[in-house]
Image (cartoon, rainbow, N blue to C red):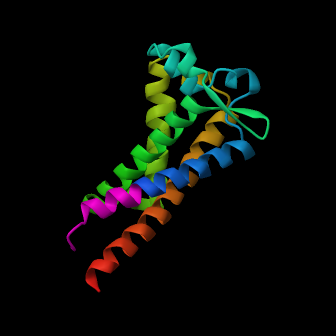
Amino acid sequence: MAKTDLKAAVIAGTVAGIFSGFVKLGWENVLPPRTPARNAVNPPQHLMEQVGVPEKIRNATYTYSEQKMPIAGFLIHFGFSTSFAILYSVAGHYLPFIKAGKGSLFGLSIWSAFHLGVMPAMKTVPDAKDQPLEEHISEAVGHVVWMHANDFISDSIYRNLTAKQHN
């Protein structure tokens, strides 16, 4: 097994996490996971309320194309995406089973852990049995698509970064 370039794996995961965060946002525009009523205060906003983030920060926005966009919510979204993309990129070199199905199993594991376990336990979202089927479908398949993007992007970038070392 070739020696893993940890710096290249972290860089690859970081870039993949940013791009895959956009993939996941796009996915949620096509198949919204929550009803408008449930999305009025979405999980990142509710989590910020739960941990005491001041309203001024929670509700901070920027305006683009005459629409107010949530700065703090996007920071949480992209922070989550990038953190798990880095974990996937690095850990996949040491524990190859993580990359089974090009990230599909890892994505489903993250969805299950957070959307069915951690967030309901924290009361950030309803218990899994009380979430609509459409939410489960959107989130489960969305996490697979998200991790496929991470797999493809991080592997490509890692190969390009490490190929330069061998030339």
Give the magenta range.
1-13
**Left-right relation of 149 to 88:** right
* Residue in front for this viewpoint, 115 or 16: 16
Which residue is at a point 73% across and 27% down the rendered structure image? 35
Residue 134 seen:
yes
Give how far across and how far down residue 75 sits, in percent. 51, 36
Q: Is residue 127 above or below residue 88?
A: above
In magenta segment, residue 8: yes
Magenta stretch secondary structure, dominant? helix
Tally the marks. Answer: 0
Image side of residue 63 versus residue 47, left or right = right
| Horizontal and vertical percent position of residue 112 | 48, 37
The reply to whether the magenta stretch includes residue 82 is no
Picture quadrant of residue 161: bottom left
Residue 125 visible, this angle: no
Location of residue 127 with respect to 96 vertically, above or below: above
Is 141 rendered above or below residue 39? Answer: below
User: How far across and how far down the image is residue 98, in percent?
Assistant: 36, 55
Q: Quadrant of the N terminus?
A: bottom left
- Residue displayed at 27% across by 78% down: 165
Looking at the image, residue 47 lies above or below residue 32: above
Q: Position of residue 7 (x, y in %)?
A: 28, 60
**Which residue occupies the extreme right position in the image?**
66
Who's the residue at 62% across and 36% down the image? 136
Looking at the rendered image, the quarter that the C terminus falls into is bottom left
Q: Is residue 4 left or right of residue 119?
A: left
- The residue depicted at 50 percent of the width and 39 percent of the height is 111
